[in-house]
Amino acid sequence: MTSHSILSHRAVSGQRKGARAALAHPLDRPVCLLPRFVRRSALAVRIYRLLSLIDWAALPERNLSRSYGQLAVPYAAFVAAYLVKIDQRLVYMSDLRRFLVDHPALCWLLGFPMSVRRGGPSSAQTDACLTTQRHLARLLRQISNTYLQALLDQTVSLLHAELIDICPEFGQTISLDTKHVIAWVKENNPKAYIKGGRYHKDQQPSGDPDCRLGCKRKRNQRTQSEKPATPLQDAVPAKGLQVGEYYWGYGSGVVATKIPGWGEFVLAELTQPFDRGDLSYFFPLMADVERRLGFRPRFGTLDAAFDAFYVYEYFHQPDESGDGPGFAAVPLTKKRGHGRTFDANGLPLCKAGLSMPLKFTFWARKGVLVPHKKGRYVCPLFFPESTGATCPIDDPHWAKGGCKTTLAASIGARIRHQLDRDSEAYKDLYKQRTATERINAQATDLGIERPKLRNEAAIANLNTLIYVLINLRALQRVRALKRDRSS
């Protein structure tokens, strides 16, 4: 590949960086300042085209001056090496170190301090200068995740700058979902014998002190098609029923946006222990989305695990442009009050079609993710005073003081029931849930599901870097597509 083709690929970022004569990190240098042995390596050039999209000099860095006079290896070198590990699908840190030793030009390009002789460094020189695999593993868990989130900030900004002229509504529609991450412990091996039982939340695996027990998929009802063809003659004990898939591990939440014809892009991500519910991801992820985009998305599509009043309320906020509020496309789960209807004043209707007045309100703080105000609605034939009339439909609750119901005192509680899930607008929005599914498929291909790591900090950092790499690859595809369409 020629220097001219690489420079044209880098476009605006290359022109901005080209004015600097001497830069701290080799990936921040223009291609004309790279040594010849780097430009002769096809692998090094490919990694350069991918990772030079980031402005490494803009990232926060640790103090590189040690008290005994030696210089520490910058975080940027390690982070770039971890991105190479993910890109090349290297499983262990020993594989990464061996790979870097076999490619001295790449090792120099990533920023590891090496003595370069004429003709470039040899593998023996690289082996002598490169840090140990144990130190590579240690730094992965010690680097602050805030540092890696700054990388994700850059990728979102670069994608927004590339696509804003194509899609002015970039980021206005988001999709949110979670992905399970299986811990590297024997308790997740069905062939291993576990004394005392495999799935006891208080019996923490010794192989990973941070992982938690959670359920990936849970069902306690059979559909009609899943019933056995012949009736069972004997009762089946409860412990023999398969109602879910349980693992020790973590969960990775991701927010993505989709532009038809251009792809799917990651806006935010968060890793938590597996015992955290899906709803616990919503507000932290959306806070990162707002910070990166500078505005609140108007539309969201999520699965039934996010069927909560505050999700609907979040997207119902009025838009600054005057286009009116958006909405969230979320399936309605089969909870109590399924199919609730309301009158023009927002009061719930009983089965007889009567408006149920509000008797009192209270705050729900215990056992809820978000403390909120609730209202207690009662039968209008008994409150505010007894009318002496009888229930028009002779409801069974009539003998006990009439119907009663408790709802969150929020517009989101009404939207949850009143949302028209048969409308074309809802169906078109819900189809965009495939954005997170495609992102999760890419992350699974890059090894997010079964990392060979044993603590939360390292796994969280690895997950962030996986999504950074997904965005960098997407940015490359967008720029290549724009060049093809303009030619």
Image: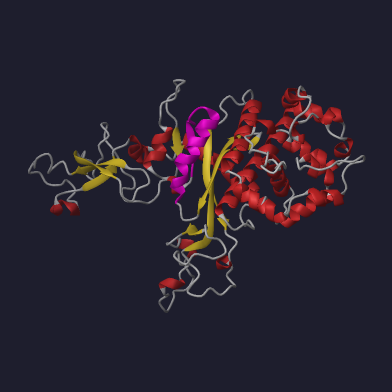
- Depth order, front residue of 361/312: 361
- Depth order, front residue of 23/151: 23
Q: Left or right: where does residue 482 sit relative to residue 409?
A: right
Query: The magenta stretch spans which residues?
Result: 277-302
Q: Left or right: where does residue 199 sit relative to residue 352?
A: right
From what the image shows, is residue 202 above or below residue 33? below
From what the image shows, is residue 71 above or below residue 138? above
> At x 13% / y 42%, what residue is drawn?
381
- Assign the N terminus to one quadrant of the image: top right
From what the image shows, is residue 221 above or below residue 49? below
Spot the residue most to the bottom. 234
Q: Left or right: where does residue 263 sit relative to residue 208?
A: right
Q: How many labels sit on residues? A: 0
The overriding secondary structure of the stretch rendered in magenta is: helix
Q: Is residue 395 visible?
A: yes
Could you tell me residue 239's position as x and y percent? 44, 72
- The quadrant holding residue 232 is bottom left
- Assign the C terminus to one quadrant of the image: top right
> At x 52% / y 58%, what residue is drawn?
211
- The quadrant holding residue 382 is top left
